[in-house]
Image: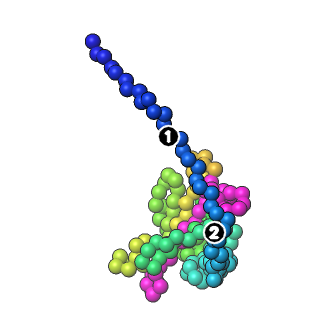
Amino acid sequence: MLTVAYHVSAQPPPVPRPFPELSSSRQQPPVQPPETVAPLIESVPTEESLGVPIYPNADYLDSYDAGRGQTFHLFGTNSTFREMVGYYSVVLDERGDRVFDAPPTHQFDTSRFRDERMNYRPSVTIKDYTWNNAEGYLNPTPGANPTRYRTVIQIATAPSGAGER
């Protein structure tokens, strides 16, 4: 027969103490605004800065550092995946490659990949966010209602001075 003994402490658990109140005689240093704040409009890339066309009704979503002088720029649109692949096939004058069938993802190379200078292939990548009955890519915008996009366009830039195809 197994006997289990429980030990019960006679002391109650410690009661949390409130934080001491700050003295009103202590003054906080003034908060200084940043010296320069770049307007959002200046941060939106242009076709000239990207080196590729931006679909006319695409909304700029964000940019991410890809390392080694490269950047990913994301754009959202409610045009279909098929329309986006067709559009970029015409404006870039190339067929591109189907990277994935599920979810559908298509990539168009925009300049030559140089392993010694780049992390990612400079390209335009189209991804279908409505695949498998999904509601679309959710872009949470601070201070506004989130927006969903059927298709996302990712433009990976080449580092400056990388040369063209």
State the residue at coordinates (55%, 64%): 126
Q: Quadrant of the N terminus?
A: top left
**Residue appearing at x 47%, y 57% in the figure:** 100
Tell me which amino acid carries mark 2: Arg
Q: Residue 14 carries which label?
A: 1
Mark 1 crowdedness (10 Å alpha carbons): few <14, some 14-19, many ≥20: few
Q: Is residue 16 above or below residue 160?
A: above
Q: What stretch is highlighted in magenta?
A: 136-165
Residue 11 position within the rendered picture, expressed as x and y whole percent measured from the top left: 45, 33
Residue 150: x percent and y percent? 63, 57
Locate residue 41, reporting x and y percent.
68, 77
Observer able to see residue 100: yes
Residue 78 visible here: no
Q: Is residue 60 left or right of residue 10?
A: right
Secondary structure, mark 1, is: loop
* Nearer-the-camera pick, 79 or 58: 58
Q: Circle 2 sits on which residue?
A: 26
Asked whether residue 138 is drawn in magenta, I would say: yes
Front-most of residues 42 and 49: 42
Q: Main secondary structure of the magenta part?
A: loop
Residue 23's image quarter?
bottom right
Q: Which quadrant holds residue 138? A: bottom right
Residue found at the very far top of the displayed protein = 1
Element on which disc 2 rests: loop
